[in-house]
Image (spheres, rainbow, N blue to C red):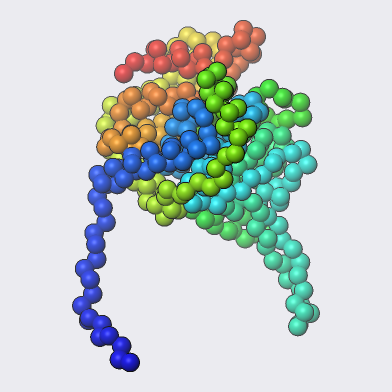
Amino acid sequence: MNEPVRSTQSAAPSSPPSDVVRVQQLASARDEIVARLRQRIIGQEDVIELLLIALFARGHGLFVGVPGLAKTLLITTLADALSLHSNRIQFTPDLMPSDVTGTDVLEEDSSTGRRHFRFIPGPVFTNILLADEINRAPPKTQAALLQSMAEGQVTASGNTYALEQPYLVFATQNPIEQEGTYPLPEAQLDRFLFQIDVRYPSQHEEIEIVKRTTAPMPTTVTPVLSARDIIGFQDLVPRVPVADHVVQHAVALVRASRPEDRKAPDIVRKNVAFGAGPRASQGLVLGAKARAILHGRYAAEIEDVRALVQPILTHRLVMNFRAEAEGVTPADVIEGIRQSIEP
């Protein structure tokens, strides 16, 4: 049988979609992702919003909430909806750094008898890493995540291994049970884009949670985006335009968290030992860009910046002894900053 003759003229390559089209695509995809999450998650609109902003801004998230609020289920469901690989590490006091990053094992070649080391990748080699109860592990084990969070790679036994992109760390922390826990160092906390407070559901939501979780549940979530799609949208975020006055407002909010700054309000001067650094300003602008395009807008505005002040600053403020004695919280300080630094 004769094979069909193939044309010697190649089809003209299709031009990539413009950024405007990509913004529209992401806004549409956002609605579909939320719909997939709603198959398993009831309520938590603000938490889902911050989770998606962190995802597309290439930021890591620290989830703080009491047990039983579906923090783990939310993150694993997100991985299913995005066709991403996910691993979960249950942090415990005896967890070692090699349990996170991986270890070298000695192997022997049966034909030659020669021995060599082979690196066995740890659970950090994934797309979405869920670090469950991260504050239960000692600081040296917590620090094993620092390089992967900052650089997207892991160094072990003198060799550096790149992590597959996208790569994000979502950690959970129980704010109530403090026995046998280790506070996260400030350097570790600063690597998280957001601290996301997961609160109790409303009565109506809790009734719906009980009804749904005590009946047969759907076991599969249809993926919305591929890893390649997500990387494309992550690359889009830095290209989102932002006016100078929006950047200036973001910087002003962060600088007002430092007690030595001349524009710091009295509540900061009296209760904060150390304010947020420049990484908070960067996070505010990047988060604002991601929030804008997730809502189908083509430029970041001041409203996007102000909406993210709380999750950006909460874990970056180091309160002094006076604040602890008088019960002044980071949330109180941030509200004072928002009121003193107006648009």
Instruction: Answer with the quarter of the image where residue 250 lies.
Output: top left
Residue located at (58% from left, 28% from top):
211
Report the quarter where the C terminus lies.
Answer: top left
Residue 238 image position (x, y, % from top left): 35, 43
Q: Is residue 9 visible?
A: yes
Residue 219 image position (x, y, % from top left): 57, 45
Identify which residue, 280 or 5, lies in the foreground.
5
Residue located at (62% from left, 60% from top):
159
Instruction: Answer with the quarter of the image where residue 179 lies.
Output: top right
Residue 215 image position (x, y, % from top left): 60, 35
Instruction: Answer with the quarter of the image where residue 209 lies.
Output: top right
Residue 97 sits above or below residue 136 on the image: below
Outermost residue, bottom side: 1
User: How many numbered discs, if any?
Assistant: 0
Residue 115 image position (x, y, % from top left): 76, 73
Residue 169 sits above or below residue 202 on the image: below
Residue 264 sits above or below residue 195 on the image: above
Report the quarter where the N terminus lies.
Answer: bottom left
